[in-house]
Amino acid sequence: MHLTASQPVTRGPSTDLRGLLLPAVTQLPRLWWVPLLIVTVLGGVMRFVNLSWPHAVVFDETYYLKDSYSLLLNGTEQQWPSDADEAFAAGKPPTTMGEPSFVVHPPVGKWLIAGSLWVFGADDPLGWRFSAACSARCPSR
């Protein structure tokens, strides 16, 4: 069949590709966001309630807490006295020894922790853990 410029092109239901490929648009329920909000609030409560417990420096906090705090105070990672963990847990952060520290981990995470130390203080575990709780995900096992 040869079409001329004066003949209109007609499309039937079987030739409308868009109609075949795209499903019909359905309207979302009015309160579609309520289940999303409930799950988000529940997840936030589970992650942030009792974040200050235990009131001790645990696992990798011994490195990240001290490096983050020295970044906040001095702009670089520095060495700490041997009783620094106990002093942080007692709510009395010590001063650094003034010597550079051996840096193993990149600084971005430490700067995030330093930000929460600046907001919440270094004398409370909430300050040590808040930024990590905001960004951490559960490990897959």
Image (cartoon, rainbow, N blue to C red):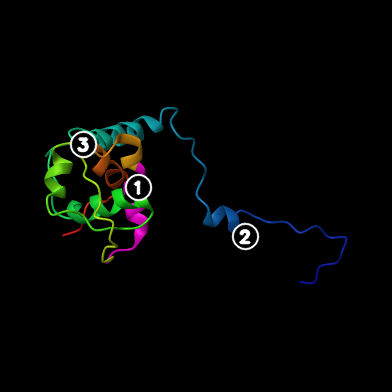
Q: Nearer the viewer, residue 55 or 16?
A: 55
What label sits on residue 46 in the rendered view? 3
Q: CA distance from mark 3 to mark 2?
A: 53 Å
Labelled disc at residue 15? 2
Front tag of 1 and 3: 1
Question: Residue 53's spot in the image, x, y percent?
Answer: 14, 37
Q: Earlier in the sequence, mark 3 or mark 2?
A: 2
Of the 4 image quadrants, the one containing the C terminus is: bottom left
* Residue 22 point in image, percent of width and height: 53, 53
Disc 3 on helix, strand or loop? helix
Q: Which residues are magenta?
A: 104-115
Determine the residue located farthest toward the bottom in the rendered image.
Answer: 2
Is residue 110 rendered to the left or right of residue 88?
right
Image mark for residue 73: 1
Closer mark to the observer between disc 2 and disc 1: 1
Q: Amino acid at mark 3?
A: Met
CA neighbours of label 3 inside 10 A, class few (<14), some (14 to 19), many (20+): few
